[in-house]
Amino acid sequence: MAIQHSSATSGATRPEIRRRILTGDRPTGRLHIGHYVGSLKNRVRLQNDYDCFFLVADYHMLTTRLDRLSEVEQNIRDMVLDYLSVGIEPERSTIYLQSLAPEVAELHLLFSMLVTANRLERMPTLKDMVRDLNVEVTYGLLGYPVLQAADILMVRAHLVPVGKDQESHLELTRQIAGRFNELFGEVFPLPDTLIGDVPTLVGTDGKAKMSKSLGNTIYLSDDAETVTQKVMRMYTDPTRLRATDPGHVEGNPVFSYLDAFDPDVTVVSELKERYRAGRVGDVEVKKRLAGSLNTFLEPFRERRAGFAARTGLVEEILREGSQRAREEARKTLAAAREAMRLNYFRG
Ligand code: ATP
Ligand code: MG
């Protein structure tokens, strides 16, 4: 795992302030094991060293999900419980709801003047969304990465732990911050990207990315039986018809998951060898994987159940977190307006 340093250092950093993290997720469903290896694991690990902001991005959800708004409230609850279950601690980190700190919309508007429509039309993530979700490119969807830049720069974050698919958005964020600083003076740091151990976890169907919207997920909150069923139905090596045929390990999602979630490297490499030689069937490998995943997920399930039983907990966390984020938002917006000389008639 390596931090990708931006070429310029962050001019707005003051040494007495703890360095900041911002990252988040859209409330389009529960979180899955891809989120864990791509981003959540880094968030939990860095909680002590950074001042962390974790965002539930409900405005971003609007860009592709206008037809499913009735599910959002439940998704928000689930997502916060997922955060808590993996070990994000609201006493140390700020968990907030994007629409409860709506200043971000004004920053988004200011930033939208600093990027061309052509640049946004060329974002690789836009093509992926149109292909996978079969959605039309609204003005809002085109601006998705600009809104993300506003989230990140609103709290003047230095580091953003995300999956590989978000790399291009972080590049754009740095570009917008750089352009703003160049035109109006040094206000924003240029944040670094931190990609997880597994940059992109493949889906259970063998598609390039596990994604809430593609129905190829194993959720952090799935019970043991569901996990086992999903694993037993997983896509493996399509060229292999019998257990005695030599199999392919590379590009086989069952082995990608074993690499990511089974701590016993020796057993896994032995299985790989036997698979390549046609000396082990898919069923045995899948049984091993189901066991490893369930061992990995069990502590999360237990913790989740404890938090879920506490009435009003999610509301309280979001209320307090959003208040804190909002204070930062107001400060940043004031600094941005000041730099742009937009503070006339403000008393
Ligand atoms: P949606 O289908 O609604 O876009 P998603 O599953 O792609 O959902 P996001 O909320 O878009 O999830 O992503 C949240 C974070 O998790 C991002 O940092 C993203 O890069 C990371 N992430 C999502 N899926 C994966 C994956 N399969 N592997 C690694 N990281 C992932
Ligand atoms: Mg996504």
Image: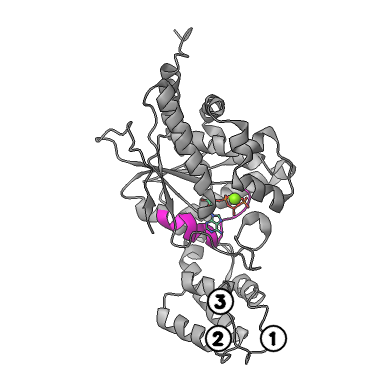
Would residue 45 appear left or right of 55 to someone viewing this image? left
Q: Which residue is mark 1?
A: 241
Nearer-the-camera pick, 59 or 183 = 183
Q: Nearer the viewer, residue 262 or 338?
A: 338
Residue 239, picture quadrant: bottom right
Say which residue appears at 58% left-offset and 90% top-offset. Answer: 278
Colouring used for the render: one colour
**Residue 340 in view, yes or no:** yes
Q: Nearer the viewer, mark 3 or mark 1?
A: 1
Residue marked by disc 3? 290
x and y, in percent, of residue 113 in the image: 55, 25
Q: Residue at x 59, y 84 (%)?
A: 247
Residue 209 x/y as whole percent? 60, 60
How far is mark 3 from mark 1, CA to CA? 22 Å
Instruction: Classify mark 3: helix, strand or loop.
Output: helix
- The tag earlier along the polypeptide, 3 or 1, is 1
Looking at this view, name the residue that lies furthest to the left.
16
In the image, residue 160 lies at what x, y percent? 43, 46
Q: Residues within 10 Å of mark 1 (few under 14, many from 20)?
A: few
Please determine whether, in this image, residue 225 is positioned above or below residue 117. below
Q: Residue at x 55, y 78 (%)?
A: 249
Counting other residues with Cα less than 10 Å from the Cα at mark 2, is it few (<14), some (14-19), or many (20 or more)? many
What number of labels is visible?
Answer: 3
- Magenta range is 28-42
Mark before the other along the chain sequence, 3 or 2: 2
Amino acid type, callout 1: Leu
Q: On the picture, is 67 further left or further right than 222?
A: right
Residues at badges 2 and 1 in contact (C-beta under 8 Å)?
Answer: no
Q: Position of residue 121 (x, y in %)?
A: 64, 39
Residue type, numbered disc 3: Ala
